[in-house]
Amino acid sequence: MGLQMGGFLKGKFFPPPASKEKIQFARECEVYVREYAPGLLQELRGIAEACSIDLQLLNTFVLALGIEPRCSIFAVSADHTIDETPLFARNYDWYERANQYFTSVVTSPSGGLTSLSLTDHPVGRYGGVNEAGLAVAVSAIPGYSKKPVPGVRMNVATRWILDTFKTTEEAASYLEEIPHQIGHNFLIADRDGNIALVETASEKVVIRNA
């Protein structure tokens, strides 16, 4: 799948330069991605090969990119909607210069679940819905100022959730298990109407079921 995405990105995407410190941080994060999102590092290798770009710079961009709090996310349970089905929504308040890179992506991993998402990222996803009816979205936390630590970046976690899980409970348990770089909120809803807000940070994870 990495080679296919790389073919789409070739000539359009070039990871920015990175400091030695950020490259080292990304290398430390690779250990956790290999454990908690196996297969994505191989996908990155395929993208780098197809695009003829430096693999370490690509890994650094994907695994250690900074982010600012901007987006809004919400979910409404079935008992509060007219047609009695859950409602899930998000917006992308993001850098205008990045708009040209946003695209709808259908991801069909081998042995995993097909999902639809909107992203400007070669591997990670900021939100989406998969074929099992599981929806997830992530938003940064205003005011969270602790220094990032090596862990699984939020949009890598979101991608793995869409690839792998079918229920809110499964996705929330995964977020409770993995190490997080910095603070983010994840909103999750499944086709049965189960909704959870998962507040994550490197020091603590709190699950709030609706």
Image (spheres, rainbow, N blue to C red):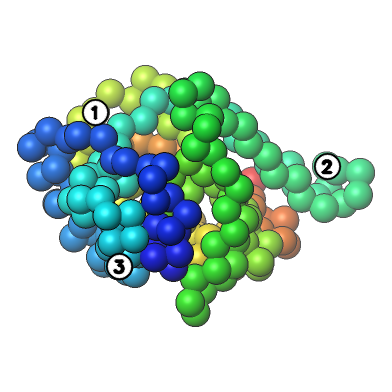
Which amino acid, mark 1?
Lys
Q: Could you tell me which residue is drawn at 73 percent across and 42 percent down?
A: 76
Q: Is residue 159 left or right of residue 41?
A: right
Q: Earlier in the sequence, mark 1 or mark 3?
A: 3
Q: Residue furthest bottom?
A: 111
Q: Residue furthest right?
A: 82
Disc 3 secondary structure class: helix
Residue on which the image places disc 1: 146
Q: Earlier in the sequence, mark 2 or mark 1?
A: 2
Kindly identify which numbered label has been placed on residue 42: 3
> Where's residue 70, x and y in %?
49, 24
> Where's residue 72, x and y in %?
58, 29
The reply to whether residue 34 is in sight is: yes
Rendered position, 123 above or below 92: below
Which amino acid, mark 2?
His
Which amino acid, mark 3?
Gln
Q: What is the CA distance from the residue labelled 1 to the residue labelled 3?
A: 30 Å
Q: Residue furthest front?
A: 11
